[in-house]
Amino acid sequence: MPGLLPPLRRIAHLDMDAFYASVELLRYPQLKGLPVVIGGGRRPADEVLQLRGALPVDQFPLLQDYVGRGVITTATYAARVFGIGSAMGLMKAAKLCPQAILLPVDFDEYRKYSRQFKAIVTDIAPLMEDRGVDEVYIDFTDVPGGQREGGRTLARLIQKAIFDATGLTCSIGVAPNKLIAKMASEFNKPQGIAIVHATDLQTAIWPLACRKINGIGPKAEAKLNALDIHTIGDLATCERQWLIAHFGKSTGAWMHHAAWGRDERPVVTVSEPVSMSRETTFDRDLHAVRDKAELGAIFTDLCTKLAGDLQRKGYVGKTIGIKLRFDDFKSVTRDATLAQATADATTLRRTAGLCLKRVDLSRKLRLLGVRVGTLSKLGTSENSSPNRLSLLTQSPSEAINTIAFNDQLF
DNA sequence: TCTGGGGTCCTAGGACCC
DNA sequence: TCTGGGGTCCTAGGACCC
């Protein structure tokens, strides 16, 4: 006789409901029900934020008074009814709903609540995968009670624990894998729980638009629609080989899998960063020659901050790159790989400066970014050799670049 | 007066090596 | 003289996600 069957995989996706807006409403409950837009601008001083806790509604900053180039990060439902949505320019949104209240994004505050809800989750179910500030996957499979009611009992418990500790609500989908769980968490928002079993594929998943699959974005959706494929069910009827012919070996095969609800990816509890970056969009477009001093200062500042990020987190990186966005919104990147991984601001600045020289800078710039990739943890054997050897281990082209350093553009 | 910032992963070509 | 064929690293761009 065969042994016991392994327990069914029960994977949960937890999504905080309107996370940023909800955190802001904890601070400013007087704004409940009003059109509020979060985005743009700089975070005001703590004193101002404290003060606002008791501020009458009519004294909050309004969208119509905003000047500048920010975008909306999120908007409350009361603001959305005016046609305002995420990623919309604030100036455009101000035309749609000038009386909306505008709050600056306060990532520090959101991160605080993020850490809090994740700690509550791992206390209950330790196998948690971090998917950003307001989302996690949780493996219910081996958690006591994780199989009860298909996971509903545990989902309720987690929802209650998070609400009791933070006052925030979330939605949870539980399914045999991450792909379906992610879709399920959207089914009954807000404060929803949805349980999807493998046998529910046709009824619960196939009627949905292809775009609901995590990984199918606007481009893939448009291409699918042009091929008269609209729902996941449509996608499931496509031959695997046909999808591969249209979308490539990897994407095509994956699409076929996804449409049939297949996904074996594990819940990953630890992961190492691959790259770190800093970028900024300027208040006005800048020209490499005419605004050289200003750009140079911003460039140095980005490198300094990035070096600080690396050092604080204990990483060094070998590939240094820049990203530019021009006034026509076209972007380019350039990078260069060093012989020796670094977290040093001067090295970052110098290498990034050399990358910049490989770009045609006749157009004005709207954004400048600096990136470090091929990261390794500081103190491991491969990156602890003394720095003075680096010239010897450089390739000839790098040595030339190093020598050409005095010829920096800015 | 369009269009943030911080990430991951994939593709594709060329260099270089065996 | 016909065009080999992997494998890996580097670079650039792009799709996608939160």
Image (cartoon, coloured by chain):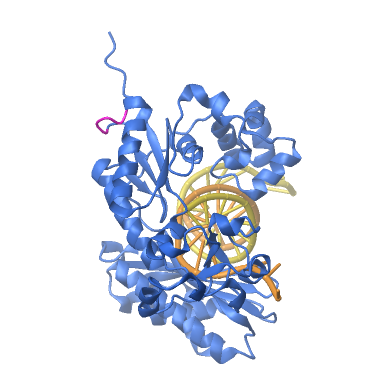
Chain colours: A blue, B orange, C yellow
Q: Nearer the viewer, residue A290 or A113?
A: A113
Residue that sits furthest to the top in the current view: A1
User: In the rendered view, does A357 fall on the left or right side of A230?
Assistant: left
Residue A410 in view of the camera: no
Circle count: 0
Asked if A207 appears above or below A397 in the picture, the reply is above
What secondary structure characterizes most of the magenta part?
Answer: loop
The residue at 62%/82% (across/down) is: A284
Q: Nearer the viewer, residue A372 or A402?
A: A372
The residue at 32%/24% (across/down) is: A7
User: In the rendered view, does A218 fall on the left or right side of A46?
Assistant: right
Please state the horizontal and vertical placement of residue A369, each as a whole percent of the image: 52, 73
Please state the horizontal and vertical placement of residue A283, each as a whole percent of the image: 58, 81
Residue A314 in magenta stretch = no
| Image quadrant in which you'd find residue A234 | top right
**Quarter of the image where the C terminus of chain A is located:** bottom right
The residue at 50%/90% (across/down) is: A406
Asked if A381 appears above or below A271 in the picture, the reply is below
Q: Nearer the viewer, residue A195 or A132?
A: A195
**Quarter of the image where the N terminus of chain A is located:** top left
The residue at 55%/89% (across/down) is: A294
Q: Bounds of the magenta span?
A: A143-147
